[in-house]
Image: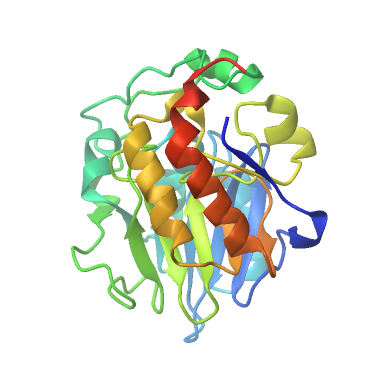
Amino acid sequence: MAQVSIPESNVAPMEHFAAGITGLRLTFVNVFAVSHPDGSWTLVDAGLPFSSGLIGGWAEKRFRNPPTAIVLTHGHFDHVSAALELAEKWDVPIFAHPLEFPYLTGKESYPAPDFGAGGGLMSFLSPLYPTKPVDLGDRLQALPSELGPGSLMAMPNWTVIPTPGHTPGHVSFFRPTDRLMIAGDAFCTTKPESFFDAAIAQPPELHGPPAYFTQDWDAAARSIQKLAELDPLIVAPGHGKPLAGDGVAEHLHRLAEQFATRGNDERAVA
C-alpha cells in the first residue's frame, strides 16, 4: 500500500497554517475558508450532513460578511452536504467541475463503494455512506474552462487543477505565490480507510485518495503525479492534518512514485 510517513515537524495547525486560510475539522473531513486581498473570502468544500450550523457558526466568528462563493473539490457526501443550506443562507453560488454535475443535479448516483478496499473500519462502513445525488439547483455553477490563476473570480490568485481519479470531476487548488495546495481527496495526510486514523489520532502519513470511493486508479495516480510536480510547500487536505515546511514536496514525490507502481494495491484488504 502506498504510504509515506511524515515527521511531526511538518504538521501545521488547522486554525492558521498559511496566510489567508483557516480550516475546520468535522470528525474526519476538513473544510477551508480562503481570504482574498480585497477582504472577501471563499468556502472550499461543505462538510458532512447536518454540519451547516457548525460551519456557519465557525465562519461567522471569523468574518464580518458571507463568502462570495462555495467551491467544491468534488461531490461526495462528506464534502457537499451543507452546501445548499449554506448557499441559500448566504445567497451565494456553488462552483464545481462540470463532470461532477450529474452527481450534484440529482441525475446520477456515484458508484457503490468498495467496502473491501484498503481495509479498515471506514471501508467496512462505506456501504452505509450516502451515494445518492444531491440537487444544488440553480445555485450550481460550472468552473471556467480556462483554469489558470485568476480565472475563477471566487478564487483570485489561485489555479484550479483538474485531478480526476477519486471522482471524474475532482479538482484541487494551488496558490503559486506561496506554493499552497488545497488537495481535496486527491491524496490524504492520514489513512482515510481507518476510523482511528481518519477521525481520532490522524497520524501524519501521506496516502492516496479514500480507496472505497475511488473510481479510476490510473487517473488518480496521474493526478498525484501532477500535484507533486508543483512542489508544494504547504498542503491542506480533505482528510488529515495540514502540512507545511521543508520536505513536504519531497514526501509528495515519494507518494507519487509509490502510487504509480502500487496504487492498485489500495483495493486490497490490508
Residue sitting at 66 percent across and 40 percent down? Answer: 190
Residue sitting at 20 percent across and 29 percent down? Answer: 107
- Please determine whether, in this image, residue 219 is positioned above or below residue 153: above
Q: Nearer the viewer, residue 135 or 183?
A: 183
- Please determine whether, in this image, residue 30 is positioned above or below residue 182: above
Percent position (x, y) of residue 266?
A: 51, 26
Q: Is residue 190 left or right of residue 220?
A: right
The answer to whether residue 81 is visible is no
Q: Nearer the viewer, residue 137 or 96?
A: 96
**For the N terminus, which image quadrant?**
top right
- Please determine whether, in this image, residue 113 is positioned above or below residue 210: above
**For the C terminus, which image quadrant?**
top right
Residue sitting at 29 percent across and 73 percent down? Answer: 148
Residue sitting at 75 percent across and 58 percent down? Answer: 11
Q: Quadrant of residue 90?
A: bottom left
Q: Quadrant of residue 251?
A: bottom right
The answer to whether residue 109 is visible is yes
Colour pattern:
rainbow
Q: Is residue 25 left or right of residue 1?
A: right
Q: Nearer the viewer, residue 127 or 204?
A: 204
Percent position (x, y) of residue 219?
A: 32, 40
Percent position (x, y) of residue 123?
A: 56, 19
Percent position (x, y) of residue 18?
A: 64, 73
Count numbered badges in the picture.
0
Q: Quadrant of residue 220?
A: top left
- Please determine whether, in this image, residue 158 is positioned above or below residue 191: below
